Image (cartoon, grey):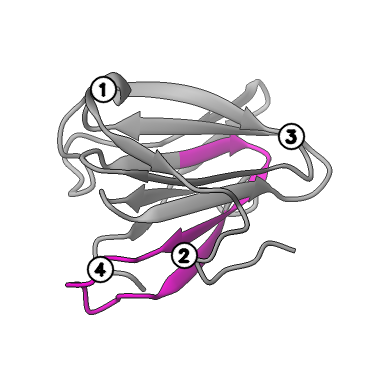
Amino acid sequence: MIKQVAVRKLNTFLDKKGSVKHMLKHQWPEFVKFGEIYFSTVNPRVIKGWKKHQKSTLNYAVPEGNIKVVVFDDRKESKFYNKIITHSIGTLNHVLLTIPPNLWYSFSSLGNKKAIIANFLDIEYSKDIHYELPLNNDQIPYKWD
């Protein structure tokens, strides 16, 4: 585990009309403040990333489909320096994945279905500085299949 990366099991309420899935509550420690929320999709066999945000904390939940998220810590002062963690989240594992600032992340859909990702940020995307690297690079010691 990388410090400050958090995984919280979320509730799903089902009935004959459909479902309600929790994402984030104000009283949870993962909630810092509201910046913006957006939804993105990732198609089957597509990998997005590598990205790193300088200021914002990301809170990912996947209400439809499933994704694999890879997080890499390149903060030299961190005791988790050069560590990689992976999480599978989505319909099969409805959790909130919190990724703090200054960690690299990348994700891909799992299976043959498009995934929908909800991202609750603590600051507006346009007010942050973010970095990108190509999937295959010499800086991150992870190779996608």
Q: Secondary structure at mark 3?
A: loop
Could you say where residue 87 lies in the image, as x and y percent from the top left? 53, 61
Q: Label 1: few (<14), some or many (≥20) within 10 Å?
A: some
* Disc nearer the start of the sequence (1/4): 4
Q: Which residues are magenta?
A: 61-88
**Amino acid tagged 2:** Gln
C-alpha separation, residue under disc 1 versus residue under disc 2: 27 Å
**Towards the viewer: 90 or 72:** 72
Residue at 24% over, 61% down: 4
- Label 1 and label 3: CA atoms lie apart by 25 Å
Looking at the image, is 64 positioned above or below residue 38?
A: below
Looking at the image, residue 59 sits to the left or right of residue 25; the answer is: right
- Quadrant where the N terminus sits is bottom left
Q: Earlier in the sequence, mark 1 or mark 2?
A: 1
Kind of residue at badge 3: Asn
Q: Which mark is residue 139?
A: 2
Give percent across and percent down for residue 145: 75, 64
Badge number at residue 124: 1
Q: Is residue 24 left or right of residue 60?
A: left
Q: Amino acid at mark 4?
A: Lys
Element type where label 2 sits in the image: loop
Residue 30 vs residue 39, the one in the foreground: 39
The outermost residue toward the front is 138
User: Is tag 4's residue or tag 2's residue first in the polypeptide sequence?
Assistant: 4
Q: Residue furthest right?
A: 112
Residue at image coords 54%, 45% = 49
Q: Determine which of the numbered discs, if any, sits on residue 43 in the image.
A: 3
Name which residue lies at 44% across and 60% down. 71
Rendering coords of residue 115 (x, y %)? 66, 36
Spatial separation of the CA atoms under disc 3 and disc 2: 26 Å
- Mark 3 closeness class: few <14, some 14–19, many ≥20 residues within 10 Å: some
